[in-house]
């Protein structure tokens, strides 16, 4: 099976927009669920609902793949699973290294969904000597001193960083120098990488803060008082302006 080092997904060369690429995994997840239920075909409306997008956007996205479905029938589920998997590069074997085997790193290592989606955890690395040799998810943890050797020997092109912010950039630099060209960053910091290296940042605290914003907004909307019932602020008095009666805020 081909490895990630020598093969890259074709999405960029085919001119597929990044926004479309970001939605392809959503479509694939919905299609995989349909396939597991032995559903042969699906309409654009049904698939869009399952993926959480509108049907017009879905049809536009699929047009970049050259897939237009059949009028009155819909899309062939199995073919779309294959087509999207191919575009995402999931028909290849992508060896991945996880740097940082704390709670988050260990949880990722134990995640069973990687293998079924084309990703193989090739190595677990940590700088703590106490963790070296310990078995996590059926794999012995290696020391970060061996990072370059492990990346080279396994043909790794994707690295996952799950360490504190302070050491993330140094680890990132070492991964890139060793040949890694894509990084999934869980550290709460922005990484600087050269052109040609892709970084995807996952910051759980930011996502929670965004949710808190929406919760606060919803709570505020529930407590809104009609404008006519609002009290007049202090130091405010109506006065007649040049265009008629205009409320004006007067200085104290």
Image (cartoon, rainbow, N blue to C red):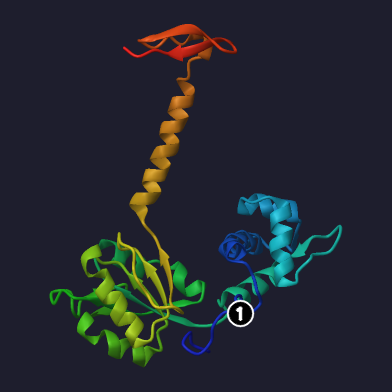
Q: Picture coordinates of residue 148 (x, y %)?
A: 29, 87
Residue under the image location 76 percent in, 56 percent down: 43
Q: Picture coordinates of residue 164 (x, y %)?
A: 23, 63
Is residue 129 shown to the viewer in this render? yes
Which quadrant holds residue 139? bottom left
Q: Between residues 58 and 33, which one lies in front from this camera angle?
A: 58
Which quadrant holds residue 59? bottom right
Q: Quadrant of the C terminus?
A: top left
Which quadrant holds residue 183? bottom left
Is residue 138 shown to the viewer in this render? no
Determine the residue located farthest toward the front in the rendered image.
Answer: 242
Q: Give the left or right position of residue 251, taking residue 243 as reference.
A: left
Determine the residue located farthest toward the right in the rendered image.
Answer: 72
Q: Give the left or right position of residue 72, taking residue 176 as reference.
A: right
Rendered position, 226 above or below 124: above
Residue under circle 1?
A: 10
**For the image shown, how many numbered marks are present on the structure?**
1
- Packing grade of label 1 (10 A; few <14, some 14-19, many >=20) is few
Rendered position, 181 above or below 245: below
Residue under the image location 76 percent in, 63 percent down: 75
Rendered position, 156 above or below 191: below
Label 1, secondary structure: give it.
loop
Q: Picture coordinates of residue 162 (x, y %)?
A: 30, 67
Residue under the image location 46 percent in, 87 percent down: 5
């Amino acid at each position: 099976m081909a490895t990630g080092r020598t093969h890259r997904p074709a999405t960029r060369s085919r001119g597929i927009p990044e926004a479309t690429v970001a939605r392809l995994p959503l479509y694939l997840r919905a299609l995989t669920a349909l396939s597991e239920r032995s559903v042969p075909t699906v309409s654009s409306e049904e698939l869009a609902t399952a993926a959480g997008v509108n049907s017009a956007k879905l049809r536009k996205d699929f047009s970049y793949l050259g897939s237009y479905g059949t009028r009155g029938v819909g899309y062939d589920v199995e073919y779309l699973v294959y087509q999207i998997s191919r575009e995402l590069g999931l028909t290849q074997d992508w060896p991945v290294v996880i740097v940082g085997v704390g709670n988050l790193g260990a949880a990722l290592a134990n995640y069973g969904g990687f293998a079924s989606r084309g990703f193989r955890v090739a190595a677990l690395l940590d700088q703590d000597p106490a963790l070296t040799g310990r078995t996590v998810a059926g794999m012995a943890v290696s020391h970060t001193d061996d990072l370059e050797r492990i990346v080279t020997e396994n043909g790794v092109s994707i690295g996952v960083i799950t360490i504190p912010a302070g050491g993330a950039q140094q680890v990132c630099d070492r991964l890139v120098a060793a040949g890694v060209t894509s990084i999934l960053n869980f550290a709460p910091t922005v990484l600087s990488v050269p052109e040609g290296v892709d970084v995807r940042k996952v910051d759980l605290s930011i996502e929670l803060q965004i949710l808190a914003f929406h919760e606060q907004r919803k709570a505020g909307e529930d407590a809104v008082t009609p404008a006519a019932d609002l009290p007049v602020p202090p130091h405010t008095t109506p006065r007649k302006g040049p265009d008629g009666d205009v409320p004006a805020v007067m200085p104290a």
